[in-house]
Amino acid sequence: MWTCEICGRTFRRQGQSHSHDARTKEDAFRGDKGKWLPLYENLKARAYERLGSFSEYYPSVGVMWKQTSTFAEVKCKKDVMEIAFYSDRLHPERNPTRWLQTSTNRVVHLISVEDDRDFEVILNWIVESYLLTQK
């Protein structure tokens, strides 16, 4: 593990590229994005029930959830809240809004939500993503 001397964040890779923006939750949910804060808090509370505590970071792109490495991200858009989680392979059956192969064994799946209707299923995928960070 490597800890950045400037921002104090820890990473698996020495010299990991990252932002030093010192943002807060208030920054992440400022303006129009504020309407997504109750939905975000609902998701986070349910994730805490399943996983226990984890760290939250607020880079300019939204909110990152991290244990030993990032396992989920939440981005607030104008019309949707986008939840990103990682897997060791592509899961087209999960109907991601988008996906991105970030390495040979890592695929980011992005799911857009407007309410908590699919949270139980999404939380199962987030748990899988969390477990990948423990390997």
Image (cartoon, rainbow, N blue to C red):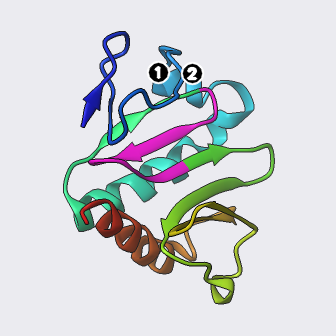
Mark 2: which amino acid? Asp
Q: Position of residue 93 (x, y in %)?
A: 66, 90
Is disc 2 placed on a helix, strand or loop? Answer: helix
The magenta region covers 60-73
Q: Nearer the viewer, residue 88 or 20?
A: 88
Q: Nearer the viewer, residue 38 or 118?
A: 118
* Residue wearing tag 2: 27
- Find out whether the residues at labels 2 and 1 contact each other: C-beta distance under 8 Å: yes
Q: Position of residue 15 (x, y in %)?
A: 41, 26
**Quadrant occupied by the N terminus:** top left
**Quadrant occupied by the C terminus:** bottom left
The residue positioned 36% from the left and 31% from the top of the image is 14
Is 31 placed above or below 75 here? above
Outermost residue toward the right in this view: 79
Is 132 placed above or below 63 here? below
Whether 96 is among the magenta residues is no
* Residue wearing tag 1: 24
Is 45 placed above or below 86 here? above
Q: Position of residue 50 (x, y in %)?
A: 25, 68
The residue positioned 42% from the left and 71% from the top of the image is 123
54 on left or right of 32: left
Q: Position of residue 26 (x, y in %)?
A: 51, 23
Mark 1: which amino acid? Thr
